[in-house]
Image (cartoon, rainbow, N blue to C red):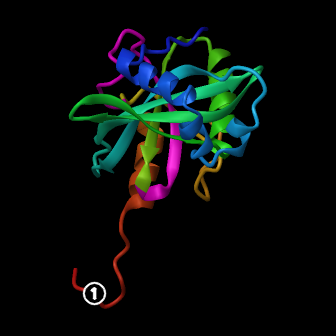
Amino acid sequence: MPLHVPPAPAPALRSVLTALSSPTAVREARTPSLLGTQGPATPELPLPVHVLDHVTAEGVSATRLAGWRFLIRCGDRAVAAAETMLTPDGWTFSHFFEGPYITSTERALRQAETMPQPYQPRLLSVPGLYMLTLWLHEDCTADGATGHPAATDLLVPLAPAPPGIAAHRPHRVAELLPVLTHRAAPTRLLGSPA
């Protein structure tokens, strides 16, 4: 089934296009693969980036929109990504980056396209575990900038995933959130007050 990629805010896309056309922004990005590209680089697959700030013991999650991420494609592959953020003046370019999450995101998106059910792709960051997941939201008509993971949505941990959590293995939110809650829970030191 095709994925239903939510539309990014037009100012976010414009800010990325402006940054891509700026030799200074590209040169200062510290992304060798973007600097060495031959041919035009284009932003594709805008994904809203949500942050999972905490999970309650009951498995209820609180998320917030942190920005929009665009994969930067040159030829037949993504060579980098561009991140945008919301400021008091609106959406603006934040930075370019590269690394393992670029290829891992592409792999997870290809994997999701083979699933029988359509999904709306998003990214979900779990800072407490240094973890990024592809969040496959069941409501394809939802506003990609809002909402929280439904129990039946899928989370696909991207590589590198934290120890003990398999990358690229889809999990229902209802199954993975309790694991994340346990893993992210602060451990009490011996002899510390309860």
Q: What residue is rendered at 40% in x and 24% in y?
A: 12
Going 58% across and 34% down the picture, which residue do you hit?
Answer: 81
169 sits to left or right of 172? right
Amino acid type of the residue tagged 1 in the rendering: Ser
Q: Quadrant of the C terminus?
A: bottom left
Q: Position of residue 126 (x, y in %)?
A: 43, 48
Front residue (pair 15, 76): 15
Q: Is residue 38 magenta?
A: no
Work out whether 48 lies above or below 141.
below
Q: Nearer the viewer, residue 25 or 120?
A: 25
Query: Is residue 30 at all visible to an observer of this figure?
Result: yes
10 Å neighbourhood of mark 1: few (<14), some, or many (≥20)? few
Q: Which residues are magenta?
A: 128-149
Which SS class for mark 1? loop
- Residue 172 visible to an observer of this rendering: no
Q: Is residue 41 left or right of residue 65?
A: right
Position in image of residue 193 (x %, y %):
22, 85
Seen from the viewer's position, the closer of residues 8 and 137 is 8
Query: What residue appears at the point 32 percent right and 48 percent down from the top-left corner?
Result: 53
Q: Which residue is mark 1?
A: 192
Count every numbered label the image shows and give the total.
Answer: 1
- Who's the residue at 29% across and 52% down the image? 57
Q: Position of residue 181 (x, y in %)?
A: 38, 53
**Viewer-nearest residue: 7 or 55:** 7
Say above or below: 133 vs 113.
below
Q: Residue furthest bottom?
A: 191
Q: Quadrant of residue 152?
A: top left
